Amino acid sequence: MPEHFRALIVVLGVAIPAFWVARRAVVGRLMGREDFNRRCKLWFAVTLLAFLSHDFWLYTIFASLVLLMAGKKEHNPAALYALLVVAVPGFEQPIPGMGLMEHIFAINHVRMLHLAILLPAALRLARQPSDPASGPWRICDGLLLTYLLYSFVHRSMFDSVTGTMRFGFYLWLDIWLPYFVVTRTVRSVAALKECMAALTLAVSITAVLAVFEMTRHWLLYESLRQALGLPISLPMYLTRGEGGALRANVTSLNAIALGYTMMIALIFSMGLARQLAARWQALFSMLVLAAGLFAALSRGPWVGAAAGIVTAMALGPGGLKRLVALVVLGAMGFGVLLLTPYADDFIDLLPFVGTVEPGSVEYRQRLFDVSMIVFWESPIFGVPDFLLHPAMQVMRQGQGIIDIVNTYIGVALSSGAVGLGLFVAPFLWIGLLLWRSLRKPACRDEELQPLGRSLLGALVGVAVTIATVSSITVIPVFYWMLLALCVTFVRQADAASVKDKSHAAVRAATYGARHDNPYLGALSQ
């Protein structure tokens, strides 16, 4: 039996029971039964097409057609997108230009979802009346558009006309389209919870597969490359430690990217815990995602998860109590770990105190030092071809590449301080609005408060993690989607505050009228 068929059996063997358990947990609480069943069928359809089509272009065409037809029934396209975003690896192929140019643009699984799910949703939005809602969250639109416009103009100064137009198309397709659709279609707290639940479920399936990959020493989805007619290309940084433990990749195609997705889903699961049918289901989901986070054996996402979880636990009423409980549970768990024979191996893997592969930490320190030399030569606007600078050549590794394992450094070197400032501005602004929203009385209920805390915690976790990895594979996909989800929460929080103030005004007016008019006072009694 071909290897990709055996891999498909494993994937289905994990996904079928996972969706069965999820149905009992989320249907009726976070997702409607009909919506859940339709989205699950689409997940299986896309997965089966990837494994059985035996051609990349056939998979892309048939999957697009299936999603286009099913999308007509979808009332929350952002939730469907979130469920499918990590269903298939992001193998990329250029669409030939047929003589007019070398290629039109490169297509992969995520871009296929953008064109088949999000673009039709955006066209439907364009036919509707413009959204009259306003508020401070609208500034995030302007900040993001400013960053995209700067990136496009900056690229045009160094690239060809066709290269610049292709880059502009990527900016629109990869960043603005998902941001626009999510912020305009997710118009209620229920829809927001639905998106977060879909993303958590999708990543939970990959978490179980990640544990399988690490324990069985088998990268399940790598066999798809040959099956789809793509060139074989083994991932970098396959193992970690003296024993050569395999670092799981699953559909993220990179161990750090996989751990990054686990970190976001784990923090989301904390915000959704009270919405599930039973407490054990919430605990089980967190344990599965924590296991997937460990299976990636990537220390950057571990640090990001710690920062995000502490942030989410510390905010809001009862934050100190939750932090104390977290410290106690962590100490108990670490104490139990010390009694096992795996204690030394685990401690060696920890960041800052572990002894496994100290060279990765040294490489990041050297990268920062060398990058500062290059940065100060063009500090304002940077240069896109900074990798050709002679000073950067000392960072070339054995694989023949210069790995910029820091998203902030990559943006600063290619776009300068201006580009870096514009890149972080939308995240800083929405983080501030999130923090302010959580302080409002309307956001202190049991529905909004956990969601807001988990979104802000995920935002902090992402900010920490991308300082240890460049924006590869699904990493930018997730942080732009997270930005959009944060905007939708702030929008709903503002609406709840306005509603709360209007109710308070009505109560105050009624109370005053009763005291001014004795007949109303008598009737109220």
Image (tube, rainbow, N blue to C red):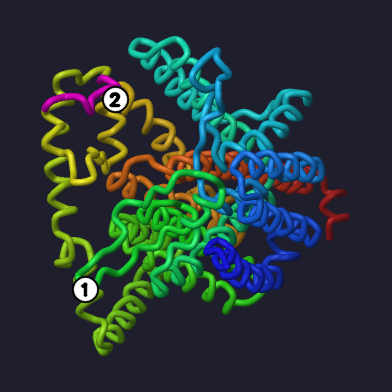
- Rendered image quadrant of residue 422: top left
Where 33 sits versus 332, above or below? above
Q: Is residue 187 visible?
A: no
Amino acid type, callout 2: Ser
Residue 344 shown left or right of residue 486 in the figure: left
Task: Tell me the element at label 1.
Answer: helix
Residue at image point 30% right, 58% down:
303
Amino acid type, callout 1: Ile
**Spot occupied by residue 338 in the image (x, y as percentages of width and height):** 24, 85
The part of the chain drawn in magenta is 382-390
- Reading the image, the residue beneath label 1 is 347
Residue at image point 52% right, 75% down:
283
* Crowd class of label 2 (few under 14; some 14 to 19; many from 20; radius 10 Å): many
- Where's the N terminus, which quadrant? bottom right
Where 342 sits versus 459, above or below? below
Q: Is residue 335 visible?
A: yes
Where 342 sits versus 372, above or below? below
| Residue in the foreground of this view, choosing between 328 and 477 | 477
| Residue in the foreground of this view, choosing between 201 and 206 | 206
- Reading the image, the residue beneath label 2 is 414
Residue 480: say if magenta: no
Residue at image point 53% right, 75% down:
284
**Spot occupied by residue 346 in the image (x, y as percentages of width and height):** 25, 74
Q: CA distance from mark 2 to mark 1?
A: 37 Å
Where 213 sits versus 46, above or below? below
- Where's the C terminus, which quadrant? bottom right
The residue most toward the front is: 1
* Crowd class of label 1 (few under 14; some 14 to 19; many from 20; radius 10 Å): some
**Spot occupied by residue 499 in the image (x, y as percentages of width and height):** 68, 43
Task: Tell me the element at label 2.
Answer: helix
Residue at image point 26% right, 89% down:
339
**Spot occupied by residue 184 in the image (x, y as percentages of width and height):** 66, 34
